[in-house]
Image: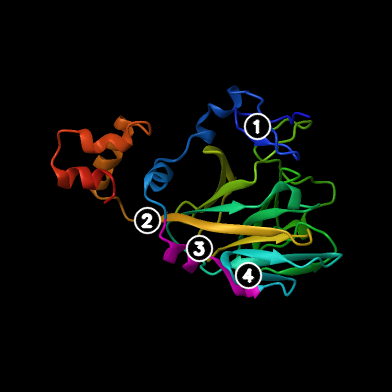
Amino acid sequence: MGQKISGSIKSVDVRGEPSYRPVRRELRGPDFCRPPRLDLLLDMPAASPEAQLRHAWNPDDRSLNVFVKEDDKLTFHRHPVAQSTDCIRGKVGHTRGLHAWTVHWPARQWGTHAVVGVASAEASLHSVGYTALVGADSESWGWDLGRNRLYHDGKDRPASAAPPTYPCFLAPDESFVLPDSLTVVLDMDEGTLSFMVDGQYLGVAFRGLKGRRLFPIVSAVWGHCEVSMRYVNGLDPEPLPLMDLCRRVARLALGRERIHHVDALPLPQTLKNYLQYQ
């Protein structure tokens, strides 16, 4: 059973079989080009284990129906409570800079409402029944992974107004099937929230986020689901040093296939180390 997707993005159906539907046209526009600062952030070494723990799920800022696992501080587990939607926030709220983190959430554990996004400290963490809780009020912004819909301030949306589709290239009869992991990109300097799948930038989902302190958040309904979050890295809003920009150009010229052969270049060792973030 192949799943219909767009954009030459690898996907996984519920049986775990890879599925491809190459439709390149929609993803060639500027809306789907990764911003240069995001390219630079993703080229940096991953955040240290200590930094990932500092940015992990907050065991003190959660619905009582979820808990952070003792043996894996980057993962939370939801109790099998019926007719309940439950959220957990990350430890760190962002007010400035560019930040990215990955969310690993097996598709078989989504249930009817699986939403990933950001929220202020005032957003609700629990609701009776099954709902897209992230995005239900004015304090949160979320992407429903199963419905391919964006939610914000849903309580005040007219019943006749359907939530916008995301990614925006989807036709009304199309569905976008995600793998088990995605990357969340929060740019507090531009005030935008975006997402990436398998390295493909899907464009801006939300704008107008400047001036807030926003935390990673998810809302879940599936009993015994487990969701992991790993902080990728962050960039301050200040202009990047010329040395960093030169390193980026050199690494782009080498390409991913040859970047591990830097030691073979006729360069001083200090420069080789710098090119490899050592």
Indicate the position of residue 74 as horizontal and vertical percent values. 56, 63
User: Label 4, label 2: how many angstroms apart (C-alpha)?
Assistant: 31 Å
Is 60 magenta? The answer is yes
User: Label 3, label 1: how many angstroms apart (C-alpha)?
Assistant: 29 Å
Q: Which residue is mark 4?
A: 68
Disc 4 + disc 2, Cβ < 8 Å: no
Mark 4 or 1: the one toward you: 4
> What stretch of residues is rendered in magenta?
47-61
Indicate the position of residue 136 as horizontal and vertical percent values. 74, 60
- SS category of the residue bearing label 1: loop
Q: Which residue is mark 3?
A: 211
The mark that comes first in sequence, 4 or 1, is 4
- Quarter in which the N terminus is drawn: top right
Quadrant housing residue 229: bottom right
Closer to the camera in the image, 262 or 234: 262
Q: Which residue is mark 1?
A: 169
User: Label 3, label 4: how many angstroms apart (C-alpha)?
Assistant: 29 Å
The mark that comes first in sequence, 3 or 4, is 4
Colour scheme shown: rainbow
Q: Which mark is residue 263?
A: none
Indicate the position of residue 26 as horizontal and vertical percent values. 60, 26
Q: Which residue is mark 2?
A: 237
Is 232 magenta? The answer is no
Quadrant housing residue 128: bottom right
